[in-house]
């Protein structure tokens, strides 16, 4: 095939071939696709904004982004969490420039319009003298996200009033993913969200989280140091959970037989000595999963997974369930990574230190694992931009058509070897989001998770 | 060592010279990728720490940096620094293969305190990293180092690195500061 691009103009329905595992490279580079993503995904989806422990008291705020909109998550005077668009309704200037802090109100540095913590317009310089009674302050407060809801402390916001409730959007797979963090106990964010930019399309960062094929190569140097057991990085038993709207969990899992054995041992001894599993180095790693309330909450399939969840579109529950990594698009070829690290409030100082040190030393920009990922993603993004190279689809076919979906009650999993089901599922869901003109259409027409063969 | 205030000008000039030469030499070893020789300049109890910086209002500027025990970009002891060097040397250490070209600029060197055998030194730095087709990253900041006088000469006992960037513009921090 020559370099000549003989394909028709972009048709969203043609960009992802789920059965064959092929993805059109233009989805990483095309400006029109990126604009469509901002509108049809980020302005519509439930976006993670912060954890409630970051804004515990009235006035505490944390600035973040929803797609290309700057937003402020703030605890208002009544104690409710608000998510306000960080733009003055008068000239559009941002009213909050700090990353986080405590505010009594939000004051615009341009003309001095001043807004209450709930976004209400409080004061306008020259209200009487210049506007002469014609400005209706009740109409000119800061805009809010259309809906704000929390799942056990994780604050999500959507800019779309038609979005279904958060828990319905998350479905069981999204809830299980977040439960990996919050079912352990009462958790809080460790101060200091690490943020850095990678010159890649956001989706190439996201699809990597399901990728248990790359550690052996990308992270070869870290593994040679013997700082992590090989079983952690190359688990043979893989388990994939696929949910509505693109949520997925991929990575190591326990067989139902091994899970049953652990639960039996636990029930018999009523001890919480560390369970085995992919990340058995910490006492805390998996013992919590044996608690009756956790088994109930996560369900028979959910409790077996040790994999990497992605809350669609861009929230990775990372590091064995002690960190969140949010991948915020900053343009079609630039992604901001944000790392949130969580500890349980009742941890001993030593346990707390262990979680924090693990996070610093393995993940984040200086992490022994993470530092080797960025250039792969940025060069994959460049690889999609070539005139000739861009015409060749990417291959996400590993395992396609080869694995069975097994149901256990109303949960289902694919128990298999290393595969690319999570990535394929994410791109299929991505195409569904782009094709749907609105939420009702997405609810009605999105691809249902496979029930037989994937 | 004498307290700083008790030193004569000649003594202070001599100490300043020795401190500066140590910092330049140490920076040169990093830029020459002589990492093992760089490790030799660290004490066994070295603490190497780069907190996370946040943009705050002027009123809350005291809270810009995370505190010890909170999140950081580096919070390393000697063993961890040795691990980082071993990673730099390992085959297929992709972040640094092909290797980055780095240049450390160390300036505004001020001896802040001398107590017993330890010298607290503040400096301004710029680390410039160039990779592949001249992709450039640059980190500017302030360092607070503690140098310890040992029988073998000066050794680095503490390095606290305070970057100016809040959102880091680089894809990673695969180099040493």
Image (tube, coloured by chain):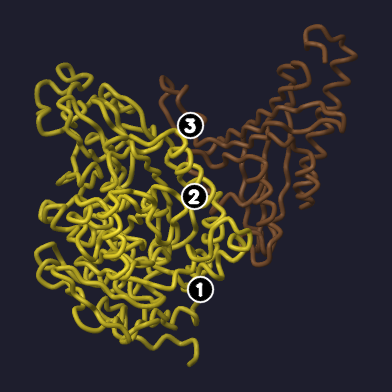
Q: Chain of mark 1?
A: A
Q: Earlier in the sequence, mark 2 or mark 1?
A: 2
Residue that badge 1 annotates? A383
Query: From what the image shows, is residue A181 above or below residue B162?
Result: below
What SS does tag 2 mark? loop
Query: From what the image shows, is residue A284 above or below residue A168?
Result: above
Q: In the rendered image, what is the letter of the chain coloured brown? A: B
Q: Is residue A86 visible?
A: no
Q: In the rendered image, what is the letter of the chain coloured yellow? A: A
Find the distance from the CA under tag 2 to the CA under tag 1. Answer: 24 Å
Find the distance from the CA under tag 3 to the CA under tag 1. Answer: 38 Å
Query: From what the image shows, is residue A106 above or below residue B100?
Result: above
Name the side, left or right, on which A182 lies relative to A349.
Answer: left
Name the side, left or right, on which A266 lies relative to A439.
Answer: right
Disc number for residue A364: 2
Residue shown at the point (62%, 32%) measured from the top left: B160
Between B15 and A183, the one lying in front of the other is A183
Q: Can you say which quadrant of the picture contains the C terminus of chain A?
A: bottom left
What SS does tag 1 mark? helix
Q: Residues within 10 Å of mark 3 (few under 14, many from 20)?
A: some
Between A130 and B54, the one lying in front of the other is B54
């Amino acid at each position: 095939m020559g370099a000549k691009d003989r394909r028709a103009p972009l048709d969203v329905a043609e960009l992802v071939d789920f059965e064959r595992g092929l993805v059109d490279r233009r989805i990483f580079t095309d400006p029109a696709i990126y604009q469509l993503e901002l509108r049809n995904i980020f302005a519509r989806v439930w976006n993670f904004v912060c954890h409630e422990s970051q804004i515990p008291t009235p006035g505490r705020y944390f600035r973040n982004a929803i797609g290309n909109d700057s937003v402020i998550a703030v605890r208002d005077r009544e104690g409710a969490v608000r998510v306000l668009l960080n733009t003055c309704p008068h000239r559009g200037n941002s009213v909050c420039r700090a990353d986080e802090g405590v505010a009594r109100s939000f004051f615009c540095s341009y003309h001095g319009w001043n807004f209450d913590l709930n976004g209400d317009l409080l004061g306008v310089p020259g209200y009487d003298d210049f506007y002469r009674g014609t400005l209706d302050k009740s109409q000119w407060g800061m805009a809010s996200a259309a809906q704000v809801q929390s799942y056990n402390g994780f604050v999500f916001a959507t800019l779309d009033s038609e979005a279904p409730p958060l828990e319905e959007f998350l479905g069981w797979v999204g809830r299980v993913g977040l439960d990996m963090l919050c079912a352990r106990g009462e958790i809080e964010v460790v101060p200091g969200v690490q943020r850095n930019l990678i010159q890649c399309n956001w989706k190439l960062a996201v699809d990597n989280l399901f990728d248990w094929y790359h550690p052996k190569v990308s992270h070869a140097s870290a593994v040679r140091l013997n700082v992590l057991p090989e079983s952690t990085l190359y688990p043979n038993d893989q388990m994939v959970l696929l949910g509505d709207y693109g949520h997925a969990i991929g990575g190591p899992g326990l067989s139902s037989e091994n899970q049953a054995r652990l639960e039996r041992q636990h029930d018999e001894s009523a001890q919480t000595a560390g369970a085995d599993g992919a990340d058995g180095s910490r006492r805390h790693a998996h013992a919590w999963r044996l608690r009756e309330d956790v088994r109930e909450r996560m369900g028979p399939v959910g409790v077996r997974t040790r994999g990497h969840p992605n809350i669609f579109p861009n929230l990775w529950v990372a590091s064995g369930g002690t960190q969140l990594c949010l991948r915020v698009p900053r343009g079609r070829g630039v992604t901001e990574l944000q790392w949130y690290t969580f500890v349980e409030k009742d941890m001993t100082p030593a346990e707390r230190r262990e979680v924090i040190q693990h996070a610093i030393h393995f993940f984040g920009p200086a992490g022994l694992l993470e530092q080797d990922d960025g250039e792969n993603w940025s060069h994959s993004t460049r690889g999609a931009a070539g005139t000739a190279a861009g015409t060749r689809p990417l291959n996400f076919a590993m395992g396609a058509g080869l694995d069975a979906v097994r149901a256990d009650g109303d949960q289902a999993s694919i128990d298999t070897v290393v595969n690319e089901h999570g990535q394929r599922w994410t791109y299929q869901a991505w195409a569904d989001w782009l094709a749907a003109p609105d939420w009702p259409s997405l609810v009605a027409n999105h691809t249902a998770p496979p029930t037989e063969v994937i | 060592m004498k307290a700083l205030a008790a030193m004569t000008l000649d003594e202070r000039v001599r100490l300043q010279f020795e401190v500066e030469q140590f910092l330049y030499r140490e920076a040169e070893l990093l830029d020459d990728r002589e990492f093992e020789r760089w490790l030799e300049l660290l004490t066994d109890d070295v603490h190497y720490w780069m907190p996370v910086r946040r943009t705050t209002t002027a009123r809350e500027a005291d809270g810009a940096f995370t505190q010890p025990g909170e999140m950081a970009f580096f919070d390393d002891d000697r063993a961890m620094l040795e691990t980082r060097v071993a990673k730099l040397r390992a085959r297929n250490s992709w972040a640094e293969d092909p290797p980055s070209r780095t240049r450390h600029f160390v300036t505004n060197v001020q001896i802040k305190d001398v107590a017993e055998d330890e010298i607290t030194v503040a400096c301004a730095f710029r680390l410039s990293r160039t990779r592949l087709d001249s992709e450039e990253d640059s980190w500017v900041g302030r360092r607070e180092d503690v140098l310890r006088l040992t029988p073998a000469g000066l050794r680095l006992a503490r390095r606290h690195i305070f970057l100016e960037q809040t959102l880091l513009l680089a894809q990673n921090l695969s180099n040493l500061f």
